[in-house]
Image (cartoon, rainbow, N blue to C red):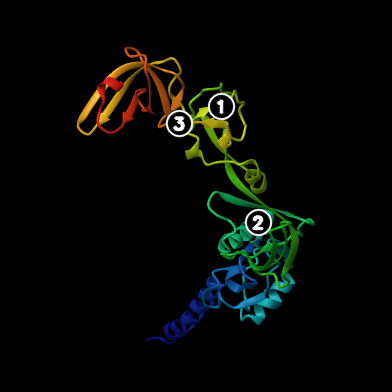
C-alpha cells in the first residue's frame, strides 16, 4: 500500500465524522407549542436526539405565549449540552403553552357534581350558579382535570355558596362566592289545546324551572299527565299541574250503556241510560230501559257498566 493511499484512508474517517456531526445538528423551530411547565430540547429543536428530554427554560403560563431571543436560546442550549444547532436564520422563537380557559361553565359543572354527591341534586335536576364577581381570566394547563373543587359551603335556605377551586398549573387557589339555583324539569304544554283533549306524549315537553317554583305550583310528572284530559282550554308553554287534568270520561251522561251484572260464572246484561258521566272505575247510575229502575255500578274502559253483587235477583234489575 502506497504512502499516499494510507494517508487518504486515515483522513477519510475524520471527514465522515465531521459530515455526520453537521447532519446531526438539531434544527431550531420558529414556533413551539408545549403542554407542560418546562420547555425541553425536543420542544425547541427538530432532530434533538438523545438530549430531547433535557430542560431548557420554563414555559409561559397556561394559555399564553412568549417570545425567546436567539441569544437566550443559545445560552440555554449550551447549558443543556447542545453546542451546535441550525438556526436557519431565525432570530427569535414564539413559545406558546396549551391551556384550558376556566370559565363559569366548568366551575358550575364541578359545583353540580358536588351537590349530586351530597344527594341534593337528584335525577331530572340541574344546578345553575351565578357568581358575585366576574371571574378572572385564568387558564389551566393541558391536564385531564383542569380544575378541582376542594371545598364548598352551601346554604340551601338562601342558595348562597362559597367555594375554593384549584386550577391545574396555577399555584394560587381560586375562591368564589355566589348563588345556586336548583332547577328541575317540569312538564309544559307543547301547543294550544282545547278542554277535553286527551294528552299524548307529543303534547308535553319538559322544560327547566326553578325547583322552588315547581314545588309551590304543584307540578307533576309526565306519566301522570299522558292519557289524562285537559280540564280547560290551555295555551302552549303552560306548566302542567295535576289539577289541570282529570281522568278521561268513558261514560257520558245520557249515554246508552250496557250493564253487566256478574256473579261467578254467570253474567246478565241489560240496556240502560247513564244518569251521570264517569271516568274509568268511577260509580255510574243507570236507568234500566225496561224496568225503569236505577242501577248502580262502575264504569268500564269500553264504556259499559259493571255490577258485582251476591246472588242475582233478576226481578231486581
Within-10-Å neighbours for mark 1: few <14, some 14–19, many 20+: some
Tally the numbered discs: 3
Distance of label 1 from label 2 (alpha carbons): 40 Å
- Label 2, on which residue? 108
Residue for point 63% across, 46% down: 215
Q: Which residue is mark 3?
A: 227
Residue plotted at (78% across, 55% down): 134
Alpha carbons under labels 3 and 2: distance apart: 38 Å
Residue sitting at the far top: 290
The part of the image, by quadrant, that contains residue 234 is: top right
Q: Position of residue 76 (x, y in %)?
A: 68, 77
Q: Residue at x 61, y 66 (%)?
A: 35
Residue at which label 1 appears? 231
Which residue occupies the foreground of this view, 172 or 157? 157
99 versus 296 height, above or below:
below
Query: Viewed as shown, does residue 307 lie left or right of 53?
Result: left
Q: Is residue 95 visible?
A: no
Q: Residues within 10 Å of mark 2 (few under 14, many from 20)?
A: some
Above or below — where is 230 with respect to 110?
above
Assess disc 3: are there few (<14), some (14-19) or many (≥20) residues with their C-alpha within 10 Å of its C-alpha: some
Amino acid at each position: 500500500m502506497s504512502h499516499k493511499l494510507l494517508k487518504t484512508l486515515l483522513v477519510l474517517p475524520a471527514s465522515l465524522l465531521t459530515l455526520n456531526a453537521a447532519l446531526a445538528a438539531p434544527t431550531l423551530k420558529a414556533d413551539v407549542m408545549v403542554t407542560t411547565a418546562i420547555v425541553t430540547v425536543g420542544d425547541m429543536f427538530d432532530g434533538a436526539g438523545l438530549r430531547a428530554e433535557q430542560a431548557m427554560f420554563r414555559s409561559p403560563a397556561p394559555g399564553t405565549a412568549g417570545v425567546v431571543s436567539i441569544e437566550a436560546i443559545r445560552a440555554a442550549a449550551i447549558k443543556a449540552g447542545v453546542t451546535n444547532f441550525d438556526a436557519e436564520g431565525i432570530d427569535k422563537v414564539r413559545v406558546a403553552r396549551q391551556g384550558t380557559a376556566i370559565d363559569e361553565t366548568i366551575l358550575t359543572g364541578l359545583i353540580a357534581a358536588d351537590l349530586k354527591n351530597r344527594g341534593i341534586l337528584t335525577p331530572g335536576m340541574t344546578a345553575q350558579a351565578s357568581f358575585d364577581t366576574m371571574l378572572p381570566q385564568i387558564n389551566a394547563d393541558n391536564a385531564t382535570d383542569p380544575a378541582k373543587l376542594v371545598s364548598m359551603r352551601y346554604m340551601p335556605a338562601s342558595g348562597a355558596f362559597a367555594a375554593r377551586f384549584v386550577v391545574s398549573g396555577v399555584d394560587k387557589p381560586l375562591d368564589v362566592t355566589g348563588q345556586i339555583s336548583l332547577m328541575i324539569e317540569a312538564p309544559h304544554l307543547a301547543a294550544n289545546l282545547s278542554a277535553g283533549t286527551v294528552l299524548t306524549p307529543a303534547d308535553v315537553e319538559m322544560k327547566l324551572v326553578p325547583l322552588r317554583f315547581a314545588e309551590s305550583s304543584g307540578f307533576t310528572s309526565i306519566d301522570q299527565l299522558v292519557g289524562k284530559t285537559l280540564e280547560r282550554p290551555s295555551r302552549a308553554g303552560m306548566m302542567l299541574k295535576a289539577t289541570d287534568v282529570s281522568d278521561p270520561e268513558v261514560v257520558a251522561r245520557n249515554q246508552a250503556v250496557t250493564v253487566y251484572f256478574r256473579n261467578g260464572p254467570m253474567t246478565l246484561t241489560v240496556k240502560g241510560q247513564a244518569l251521570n258521566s264517569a271516568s274509568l272505575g268511577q260509580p255510574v247510575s243507570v236507568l234500566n230501559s225496561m224496568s225503569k229502575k236505577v242501577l248502580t255500578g262502575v264504569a268500564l274502559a269500553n264504556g259499559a257498566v259493571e255490577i258485582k253483587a251476591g246472588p242475582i235477583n233478576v226481578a231486581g234489575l
